Amino acid sequence: MKVLDAEFTQGFIRMANDGWEQGWHERNGGNLSYRMKPEEVDMVKDDLKARDWQPIGTTVPDLAGEFFMVTGSGKFFRNVIIKPEDSFCIIEVDEKGENYRIMWGLVNGGRPTSELPSHLMNHEVKKRVTGGKYRVIYHAHPANTIALTFVLPLTDEAFTRELWEMATECPVVFPDGIGVVPWMVPGGREIAVETSKLMEKYDVAIWAHHGMFAAGEDFDLTFGLMHTVEKSAEILVKTLSMTGTKRQTITPTDFRNLARDFNVTLPERFLFEK
Ligand code: 13P
Ligand code: ZN
């Protein structure tokens, strides 16, 4: 089967285009990666052709031999739907988890996203902690979430609690909370290490003054997670724009009641008295 005809490729393209339509991907902003299932690799194997090995820039031994579909560096999400073969690629990770090679795509040259270290280190953590269930890592530049990183304290507690409060669904959608990475130079191993540490306990990591990373089982859940966090951030931005103080909100007791009825565990460290 051709890569472009596979269902997972269509899901990848749709998610990239949905992100573009949300306004989260100015120019080449953002990147997306998907850890392929062995049967999906098998399905498209006749359409794959190996190029030279290149260093990843970090080490991901637990991803040895895995195949990923990943957006290209400098490529525009806006173009993914019309030029898929130019916009993204399939890569294979070598047996040591130190190098990758392009197996398909990026037909006009280029390389995988500059955030490949963050994507792969996050995949490595999520593969381990979810027993292989999570397959998608998504980075975007959603404006409301970024705006909040200029206003809220850059702590997991502040972001989790504020975003939980702005939409009742939030504690159910991301009960483990949200992690925050202070401003760092993007594109390298250092920010990848900090982000992947947060991915040990959260599905969402916010990069101060830059954007967001979300992790999930499939395209729907990962896109939906990013969408939910950003929607909540938008409500907070609107509220703060109208008034500096909330007249009423969801209280710690309300959250505990919600947790009981919806059968989720909400860590007490986010339910502090203000
Ligand atoms: P790439 O074009 O290399 O994917 O970079 C975009 C980006 O958002 C960097 O953080
Ligand atoms: Zn970015």
Image: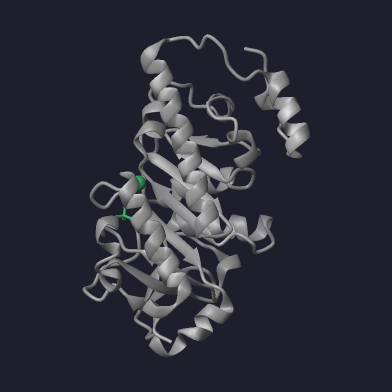
State the image quarter where residue 96 is shown. bottom right
User: Going by the image, does 96 lie left or right of 239?
Assistant: right
Residue 234: image location, x then y, percent: 41, 30
User: Going by the image, does 219 lie left or right of 177?
Assistant: left
The residue depicted at 47 percent of the width and 9 percent of the height is 245
User: Going by the image, does 22 lie left or right of 255?
Assistant: left
Identify whether 191 is placed above or below 220: above
Q: How is the image coloured?
A: one colour
Residue 116: image location, x then y, percent: 41, 59
* Quadrant assignment for the C terminus: top right
Residue lying furthest bottom: 46
Residue 240: image location, x then y, percent: 41, 17
Nearest to the observer: residue 240 or residue 37:
240
The residue depicted at 34 percent of the width and 81 percent of the height is 51
The residue depicted at 58 percent of the width and 17 percent of the height is 249
State the image quarter where residue 260 is shown. top right
Q: How many marks?
A: 0
Identify whether 240 is placed above or below 133: above
Identify whether 262 is placed above or below 190: above
Q: Is residue 114 visible to us here?
A: no
Q: Is residue 252 visible to us here?
A: yes
The residue depicted at 40 percent of the width and 79 percent of the height is 5
* Quadrant assignment for the N terminus: bottom left
User: Going by the image, does 43 lie left or right of 82?
Assistant: right
Residue 148: image location, x then y, percent: 41, 26
